[in-house]
Amino acid sequence: MLTFFDLVQEHDFRQFVVNRISSSTKKTYCFPTRFPKLCKYRTLSLYSIEDIINESFTLSSIGEFNDAFDGAIHQYGTDEERTRAAELKWQELEYHRVNAGLPESVLHHDQFVTPYKNYYKETSRLQLRELDYLGTYVGCLCEENTSTLMWAHYADSNKGMCIEYDFNQLPDDAKIRKMLFPVVYTDTPIYVSDLMNDTNHSIYDYSMDAAVLCSALNKANIWSYEREWRLMMVWTTLREKTRRFPILLHIQPSNIFLGYHFLKHFFYYDKVSSDERDQYKALFKSFLNLLSYLKEKAVPIAIMVPDVGSYRFKPLAISADELQVFMHEEFDEDSPKNMRYYYTVHDHLMDLLERTQEDNHA
């Protein structure tokens, strides 16, 4: 029996899922072999910095996501659907009874159908979160780095960062290439009930796996602004379910974009506890390590600055060297020289960015 990891590498399985999504949504859908630059919005934290330096990528359990419908499998949602399913079971029982030449059952119609309707009601609740039970882990990526909503929602209110990856750097035969899928947005969920009921594999040998992938790649149209791609795996054999699951990417970022207010992470109030102060200082040191890594790997850095006159950000480039010098000038070891004046330090950074742009265009 093939695992999900094996299945997503198989052409026939991938084609079946593509066909199902296309026919259900009436949209042209495919799994590209070449990828656009894809961005991961993250908070600026010890964990996110470790991921970059270690060239790893953290997948999250789908049950942790902010959309209650994310990865939901929709079946038996209405009383009509539950009644129809229960009636089909009754007809199946009657068919076998008649063919076997047995007398009418002592079990009457309503005595059979009512418990089955309740069973399908419970089944509907379970299947709505089936992907979470199965151990579905997803890494969410976006096609653009300037989305004001993405910076607000997923990058700690512009205090985080956006990590850009070029997955085309991976060899053509790298298995991770076939774990990366574009999301399809619809007004109603993709139909997978027939696949969920295909216990005899009359539709497809891997109907359940196909239903899982279709559901995981389908989101409501209201989320379409995210332009999302998903790096996805299902681990049904995990001994203990975790909230997060890191995997090795074996590629470095193609760009790092820092949020407009990333410096706020290094300013804290005098009354914070010693433990909290230690956390701020640890993050500062980790950030300097990140700059050293980006310098060594020649990864470009930019800071996202509001484009005055519009509601979008523009990336202003800065070298790792320049940012390292700035941090050492404005901070005494791991604390700002003046904790009270965040915007003074922030203005110094904006001045530096403007000078850098002028020098680059000179």
Image: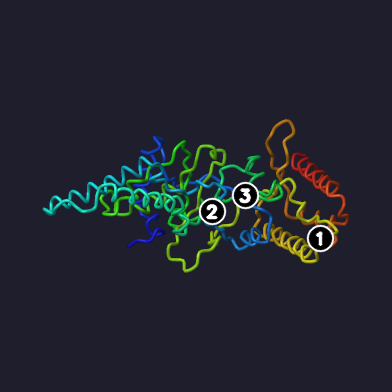
Q: Earlier in the sequence, mark 1 or mark 3?
A: 3
Q: Residue at x 59, y 48 (%)?
A: 39
Label 3 sits on a secondary structure element that is strand
Residue 289 place in picture, x, y as percent: 71, 62
Direction top: furthest residue: 309
Disc 1 crowd, CA 10 A, few/some/many (<14, 14-19, 20+): few
Disc 3 crowd, CA 10 A, few/some/many (<14, 14-19, 20+): many
Label 1 sits on a secondary structure element that is loop
Q: Earlier in the sequence, mark 3 or mark 2?
A: 3
In the picture, measured across the screen, residue 184 lies left or right of residue 348, that is left
Q: Is residue 272 above or below residue 239?
A: above
Check disc 1 and give the amino acid type. Answer: Val
Residue 237, quarter of the rendered image: bottom left
Residues 55 and 48: in front is: 48
Q: Nearer the viewer, mark 1 or mark 3?
A: 1
Q: Which mark is residue 139?
A: 2
The quadrant of the image that shows the N terminus is bottom left
In the picture, measured across the screen, residue 260 lies left or right of residue 207, that is right
Check disc 3 and give the amino acid type. Answer: Tyr
The residue that disc 1 covers is 272
The residue that disc 3 covers is 41
Residue 82 place in picture, x, y as percent: 35, 45
Q: Is residue 154 above or below residue 173?
A: above
Residues 259 and 117: in front is: 117
Residue 28 place in picture, x, y as percent: 41, 37
The quadrant of the image that shows the C terminus is top right
Residues 5 and 239: in front is: 239
Residue 46, quarter of the rendered image: bottom right
Q: Earlier in the sequence, mark 1 or mark 2?
A: 2
Q: Nearer the viewer, mark 1 or mark 2?
A: 1
Q: Which mark is residue 237?
A: none
Question: Real-space Cα distance between discs 1 and 2?
Answer: 33 Å
